[in-house]
Amino acid sequence: MPNENMIHIQGLNLTFGHGSKTNQVLYDVDLSVRQGEIFGLVGESGSGKTTVLKCLAGLLTQWQGEMAIDGKPLSHGINRPQCRQVQMVFQDPYGSLHPRHNVESILEEPLAIHHIDNRDDRIDSMLVKVGLSPAFRDRFPHQLSGGQRQRVAIARALILEPRVLLLDEPTSALDVSVQAEILNLLAELQQREGLTYLMVTHDLGVIAHLCHRVAVMQHGRILETLATDDLLGQGPQTEYTRVLIDASQHYSRELAQQVAGQ
């Protein structure tokens, strides 16, 4: 795996509001992801994981610090070259796809925005790459299963041929039976296309299955970064990471149902 960094974040801070209503949500986040690496971000809800992705994607613009993709500094906003380099796959595929646009329209839109030709062939090829077929072009999101919708969302992200995918809990809204299929698809695409992934997840099983390294976040800060192989061994240095691992290992669906019923 090449050593050069595809994603570089240094001293990333983000604050919402003004005066007495100021709320800082990211504190001096430092993060580097190598080219061709799958890097995981874990932590409890509200720890700032998705916020980091949104800053990289240009969806949040008031950040302070330094961010770069493939050595090129990012501006505070969205521009076309950045969109060609970085794309995001959201947690809820039904919410992220326009309900009145069919699959063909969903995949054609980014090609039209970026004035890319040969659209029909690109759409057919991308549908095949994500495990669908050209027959899905005329279908609308409500006519697709959850897994099929997420495949379309992945196809939309990849149709501009980016080098970086930002993955925000890409399987958490799916049935358990479908989650492994999508994870295997993402792993296959990463290998075939030489992509770099930054993935947010609550599931340490996903981290163990897919990621090379992982950073642990709490209250807007990076607590530690370690190799995935060290995650379940003697690697974790902070008590918070050890609590996350313990909670993941002892999670029980039956226990969760009992707690919900109390």
Image (cartoon, rainbow, N blue to C red):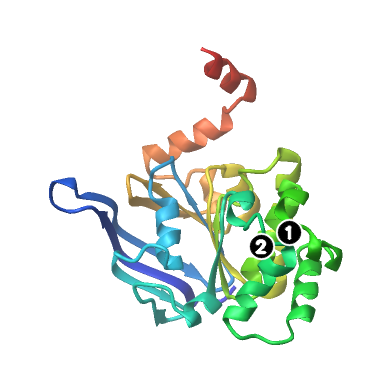
Relative placement, left or right, of 206 versus 33 is: right
The one nearer the camera, 120 or 169, is 120
The one nearer the camera, 144 or 31, is 144
Q: Amino acid at mark 1?
A: Leu
Looking at the image, is 21 positioned above or below residue 243?
below
Could you say where residue 154 lies in the image, as x and y percent from the top left?
66, 62
Residue at image position (49%, 82%) is 81
Q: Quadrant of residue 71?
A: bottom left
Relative placement, left or right, of 249 versus 12 is: right
Q: Where does the N terminus fall, quadrant-wise?
A: bottom right
Q: Nearer the viewer, mark 1 or mark 2?
A: 2
Q: Which residue is mark 1?
A: 185
Give the distance between the C-alpha atoms of the residues marked 1 and 2, in whole angstroms. 10 Å
Q: Residues within 10 Å of mark 1 (few under 14, many from 20)?
A: some
Mark 1: secondary structure: helix
Q: Residues within 10 Å of mark 2 (few under 14, many from 20)?
A: many
Q: Is residue 190 visible?
A: no
Q: Amino acid at mark 2?
A: Ile
Looking at the image, is 239 positioned above or below residue 55?
above
Could you say where residue 241 lies in the image, as x and y percent from the top left?
43, 41
| Name of the residue lying farthest toward the top | 262
- Earlier in the chain: of badge 1 and badge 2, it is 2
Looking at the image, is 175 positioned above or below residue 121?
above
Mark 2: secondary structure: helix
Q: Are marks 1 and 2 in contact (CB under 8 Å)?
A: yes
Residue at image position (80%, 73%) is 124
Residue at image position (81%, 62%) is 136
Residue at image position (51%, 37%) is 245
Q: Quadrant of residue 164?
A: bottom right
Q: Which residue is mark 2?
A: 154
Looking at the image, is 178 positioned above or below residue 199?
above
Could you say where residue 177 lies in the image, as x and y percent from the top left?
76, 40
